[in-house]
Amino acid sequence: MKETMLFDSALFPLTLVRCSLEKEERLEEGNGSSLSFYLCEEGDMSFFFPETVIPLVSGGAVYVNRAGQLELKANSDSTYTRLSFQRSLADENSFTKEKYLEPLFSSQLEFAVLSKQSALPLRRAFDTIERGAFGYELSVLSSLYEIFGIIAYEKQDMLKVKKEKDERLERMLSFMQSHLDEKLTLPDIAGAGYVSLREASRLFERHLGTSPMKYFLTLRLEKAKELLEDRSMTIGEAAYRLGFESVSHFSTCFRKLYAISPSEWRDRF
């Protein structure tokens, strides 16, 4: 293993380390009292938690929320970057801390896998730290808060986070969940919420930070991961069941979001 310290400062409570592992090399990591993000920069890795194995390829990231056993294995020559920080990173008395950060840090959530899109703010934070330009602390905090917001939304049932609900959005989300096997259009989705196309897009952007169609695609691909766990079902059958026009289109969308093909996901599950 080769380890390079990129940033370590008592003035700004975080540590950034880049590690390189050779193929088949394993590494046990104890988080201690730190919270950490791991970003796979190159290669193909597996993260072993006590009851779960998480595959990560280039561009993939995982947030580790609890101290405990964690083992990394390089399935090929790999490089990853780890950002570790203390809860004091968000010590200011703020609404954000009280409503989102403390419920996340104190929860029983062990880890959270970030989609390739969700990991982009993490990459920005890393680049900002390495540049070290004046005011970098604010930029880094902004990027991390963006990721924490994504995790808090996706894990709100576990975190018991109270979110302001919009009945129109809830109707559209419920409609999406019950029609994952169909090729919905924006008018279909907006109609379920009894809103205009423009208002549907505004609601999704405001509450979820994305468009209705991108969100629906993500829901279908998340369901695809469940279907791929059933090895009696072919990839083509999974794609057909979720309304994709072809296996090729399904595979392209899956790889674009998760940086891994459906067959690779199934093999590593």
Image (spheres, rainbow, N blue to C red):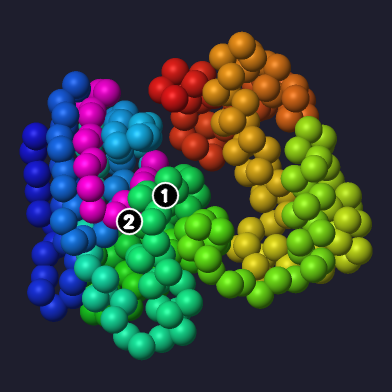
Q: Residues within 10 Å of mark 1 (few under 14, many from 20)?
A: some
Task: Determine if residue 158 is in view.
Answer: yes
Q: What's the residue at 62%, 26% (across, down)?
A: 227
Specify whether 173 is left or right of 138.
right
Q: In which quarter of the image is residue 23?
A: top left
Q: Nearer the viewer, residue 137 or 103?
A: 103
Specify whether 37 is left or right of 236.
left
Q: Position of residue 263 (x, y in %)?
A: 51, 19
* Cα distance between the residues tagged 2 and 1: 8 Å
For residue 65, which numbered disc appears in the image? 2
Q: Is residue 72 found inside the magenta-colored segment of the image?
A: yes
Mark 2 residue type: Asn
Specify whether 39 is left or right of 15.
right
Q: Position of residue 63 (x, y in %)?
A: 35, 52
Q: Where is residue 189 in the image (x, y as percent from the top left)?
A: 84, 53
Q: Which of marks 2 and 1 is nearer the N terminus?
A: 2
Q: What's the residue at 82%, 50% (across, down)?
A: 175
- Measured along the vertical axis of the image, is residue 168 above or below residue 182? below
Mark 1 residue type: Ala
Q: What's the residue at 68%, 38% (across, down)?
A: 220
Secondary structure beneath disc 1? strand
The residue pinned by badge 1 equals 112
Q: Give the range drawn in magenta.
A: 60-77
